[in-house]
Amino acid sequence: MKMMIVGALALSIVAGSVATAQPYGNGPGQGQGNRGQAASHKNWGKDYGGSHKWKRGQRVGYNDWQSAQVVDYRQHKLRQPPRGYEWRESNGQYIMAAVATGLIASIILNAGH
């Protein structure tokens, strides 16, 4: 009887850990080539790094958007962005883009230079 209880306890521990385990490469940001991150940001554009000159209608890459400095539009005398958009500064450019997709609606060149 004692052996059966110990066996059932051991089986429940093993079964519980198997049920919660996640296969390699299926979690966010896991797997070869960061497929999890790419899938969750598939509507974003290509990342170019800090030296790219953006154009209206392009999509900012997710990493470029995350690394760009958030801008207070009031302080810099920029127009108020519509809901879902915000201003960022990247490589001397003020970029107003959609927060969800990086779609650029407006650009002001030579920001603060």
Image (spheres, grey):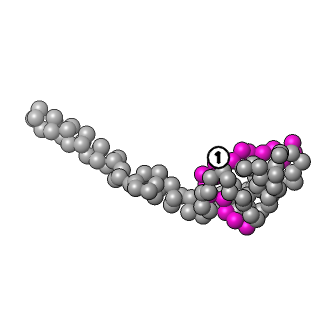
Q: Residue furthest top?
A: 2
- Tell me if 71 is positioned left or right of 15 in this view: right
Specify the quadrant of the image occupied by residue 109: bottom right
Q: Tell me the residue at 67%/53% (across/down).
A: 51
Asked if residue 113 is positioned above or below residue 53 in the image, the reply reads above
Camera-side residue of 112 and 64: 112
Q: Looking at the rendering, in which quadrant would you find the N terminus? A: top left
What amino acid is labelled 1 in the image?
A: Ser
Q: Residue at x 73, y 67 (%)?
A: 57
Q: Position of residue 102 (x, y in %)?
A: 67, 59
Residue at 43% x, 51% y is 30
SS at badge 1: helix
| Residue 59 within the magenta-colored segment of the rendering | yes
Q: Residue furthest bottom?
A: 57
Q: Quadrant of residue 10?
A: top left
Residue drawn 51% across the image and 59% down it: 38
Q: Which residues are magenta?
A: 57-75
Asked if 108 appears above or below 6 in the picture, the reply is: below
- Specify the farthest residue to the right: 77
Q: Position of residue 48 (x, y in %)?
A: 62, 57
Identify the image quadrant of residue 52: bottom right
Give percent across and percent down for residue 16: 29, 44
Which residue lies under the disc numbered 1?
67
Residue 1 relative to residue 88: left or right: left
Badge 1 local density, few (<14 within 10 Å), some, or many (20+)?
few
Left or right: 25, with 69 as reference point: left
Q: Nearer the viewer, residue 18 or 40?
A: 40
- Can you give x and y, in whole percent of width and height, for residue 77 in the image? 89, 48
The answer to whether residue 108 is above or below residue 70 is: below
- Mark yes or no: residue 81 visible: no
Q: Is residue 104 left or right of residue 77?
A: left
Q: Quick check: can you spot residue 85?
A: yes
